[in-house]
């Protein structure tokens, strides 16, 4: 039985971070199953799911520790159960939510609190500050999997009204993926 | 009548620039096979290379997705060419030839396509929204371009779409990174 590992790594960005971490994985016979890696300003963060051979994971841990020390990365590793590591079927509709407006505190919390209350699962979320330096605007993009019994109109109205209460604009779009 | 297996990546036929084809019996046969195959799968369009025919024929039927504007319904297009395009839209696309993968792709909002019927009658189609997405996706197949080739700006797609709607940014021709590779 292969082992599935969730590995996170973050630290100050510089060339070679991904190459260093993946070298440790490769030398330990791992396959990279899924990953998300991105830079926030000067910091870089890696989250990945690796399939490890049916062997002790200590050699990998030692390699990652060495890489982390060399590249000044904070590295975490957690072993998953096989069913935790398998792709999840999407039962509800997927929505894209864009929230934008004058920067103020509490926007992310207000919107995500509504999503949580409706049983929607956030699958991706990104925020950034845009606009001119003297007039910053806050932009958040969310991809969320709604509850299976969600009604698109109710979902949209709830989020738009929540945004209005916060003084921000909210756009909701149901993603309707189709094969071509 | 023939339902053919859908060619899936990494089959090299999906990365091939297809040849134009003359109207006539052979074209009518391929179009029929495309329709039979499309009827057997959950898709709204299909291109000839997806059944292993390296010719320039596509079928598009936006009406097969009940949540979207049906557009012109079923269209069989031989040697289709996008002669004009305008605007931008982002759509989450999947492909019969790349199972189990979805991606947000930015494409033109409106396209004008010139083509022929399998019998050789010229057609000119104005399409927008969902139907325009399907047309662009299928015509890309004829140049060996997959939707995977169209992914870019991973962090910005949604925001750019919003801003282009608000300021009515004039359309820039979508650069086609692989279309000139023939």
Image: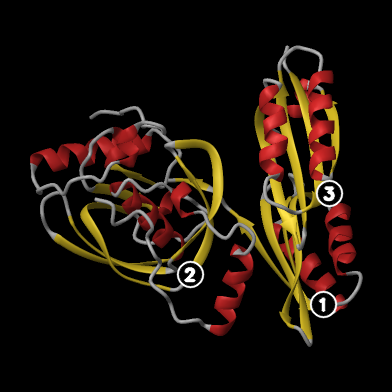
Q: Chain of mark 3?
A: A
Q: Separation of disc 3 and disc 2 at Cα?
A: 32 Å
Q: Separation of disc 1 and disc 2 at Cα?
A: 27 Å
Would you name the residue on which mark 1 appears? A164
Compare marks 3 and 1 and give the one earlier in the sequence.
Answer: 3
Look at the numbered disc 1 and give the secondary structure of its residue.
Answer: helix
- Disc sitting over residue B88 in the figure: 2
Q: Residues within 10 Å of mark 1 (few under 14, many from 20)?
A: few
Horizontally, residue A15 falls left or right of residue B58, namely right
Instruction: State yes or no: discs 3 and 2 in contact (Cβ < 8 Å).
Output: no
Of badges 3 and 2, nearer the viewer stands 2
Instruction: State yes or no: discs 1 and 2 in contact (Cβ < 8 Å).
Output: no
Q: Quadrant of residue A153?
A: bottom right
Horizontally, residue A128 falls left or right of residue B97, namely right
Q: Chain of mark 1?
A: A
**In the image, are marks 1 and 2 on the same chain?**
no
Which residue is located at x 16 percent, y 37 percent?
A: B29
Look at the numbered disc 3 and give the secondary structure of its residue.
Answer: loop
Camera sees residue B160: yes
- Disc sitting over residue A119 in the figure: 3
Q: Residues within 10 Å of mark 3 (few under 14, many from 20)?
A: some
Camera sees residue B70: no
Q: Quadrant of residue B37?
A: top left
Look at the numbered disc 2 and give the secondary structure of its residue.
Answer: loop
Q: In x, y percent, where is residue A126?
A: 74, 59
Q: Chain of mark 2?
A: B
Q: In x, y percent, where is residue B33?
A: 25, 35
Of badges 1 and 2, nearer the viewer stands 2
- Taking depth in this image into account, of A29 and B73 the one nearest to the observer is A29
Which residue is located at x 73 percent, y 37 percent?
A: A48
**In the image, are marks 3 and 2 on the same chain?**
no
């Amino acid at each position: 039985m292969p082992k599935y590992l969730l590995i996170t790594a973050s630290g100050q960005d510089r060339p070679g971070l991904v190459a260093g971490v993946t070298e440790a994985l490769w030398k330990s016979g791992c396959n990279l199953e899924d990953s998300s890696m991105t830079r926030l300003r000067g910091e870089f963060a890696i989250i990945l799911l690796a399939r490890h051979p049916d062997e002790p994971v200590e050699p990998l841990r030692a390699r990652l520790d060495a890489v982390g020390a060399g590249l000044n990365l904070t590295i975490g590793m957690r072993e998953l159960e096989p069913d935790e590591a398998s792709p999840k079927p999407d039962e509800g509709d997927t929505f894209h939510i864009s929230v934008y407006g004058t920067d103020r505190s509490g926007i992310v919390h207000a919107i995500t609190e509504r999503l949580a209350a409706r049983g929607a699962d956030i699958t991706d979320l990104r925020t950034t500050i845009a606009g001119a330096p003297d007039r910053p605007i806050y932009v958040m993009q969310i991809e969320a999997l709604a509850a299976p019994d969600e009604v698109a109109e109710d979902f949209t109205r709830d989020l738009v009204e929540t945004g209005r209460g916060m003084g921000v604009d909210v756009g909701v779009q149901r993603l309707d993926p189709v094969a071509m | 009548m023939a339902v053919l297996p859908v060619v899936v990546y990494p089959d090299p036929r999906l990365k091939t620039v297809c040849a134009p084809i003359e109207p006539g019996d052979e074209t009518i046969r391929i179009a029929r096979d495309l329709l039979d195959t499309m009827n057997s799968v959950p898709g709204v369009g299909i291109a000839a290379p997806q059944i292993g025919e390296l010719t320039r024929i596509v079928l598009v039927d936006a009406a097969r997705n009940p949540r979207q504007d049906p557009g012109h319904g079923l269209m069989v297009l031989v040697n289709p060419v996008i002669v004009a395009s305008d605007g931008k839209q982002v759509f989450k696309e999947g492909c019969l030839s790349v199972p189990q993968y979805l991606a947000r792709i930015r494409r033109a909002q409106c396209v004008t396509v010139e083509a022929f019927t399998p019998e050789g009658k010229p057609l000119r189609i104005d399409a927008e929204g969902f139907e325009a997405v399907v047309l662009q996706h299928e015509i890309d197949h004829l140049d060996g371009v997959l939707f995977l080739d169209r992914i870019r700006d991973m962090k910005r797609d949604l925001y750019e779409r919003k801003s282009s709607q608000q300021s009515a940014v004039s359309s820039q021709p979508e650069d086609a990174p692989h279309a000139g590779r023939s």
